Amino acid sequence: YAHGRATEADLVALLPRWKKELTKQYRTTYTEWRHPLVTLTCLALDLEHPAAADLLAWWSKPKPLWKE
């Protein structure tokens, strides 16, 4: 489940940013953290939002060799 008490309005507000910002490298100084795209995907799944399919497809695509 997604952390917090996000609603569908929060999900809709974040969706325009997911391909432009959230899929890019996310820098943090924390040793334990959860990438915002993971939370967004979980939220879409929890709310059974149509965007969940697109998010899951993004996670399922092959990883480029240069990222290994």
Image (cartoon, helix red, strand yellow):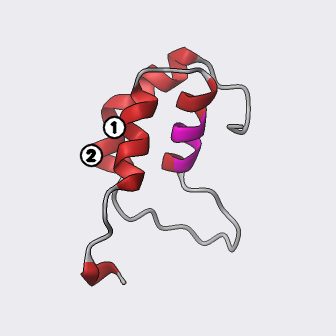
Which label is found at residue 20? Answer: 2
Q: Quadrant of residue 56?
A: top left
Query: What secondary structure prevails in the magenta region?
Result: helix
Which of 14 and 66 lies nearest the eye of the viewer? 66
Point out residue 65 in the picture as x, y percentages from the top left corner.
27, 81
**Residue numbers of the magenta segment:** 38-42
- Residue drawn at (73%, 33%) of the image: 4
The answer to which of 8 and 27 lies nearer the viewer is 8
Badge 2 amino acid? Lys
Residue at the farthest top position: 9
Residue 43 in which image quadrant: top right
**Left or right of 16: which side holds 7?**
right
Amino acid on which disc 1 is placed:
Arg
Which residue carries the number 1 mark? 17
Q: How many marks?
A: 2
Q: Is residue 43 left or right of residue 66?
A: right
> In front: 28, or 52?
52
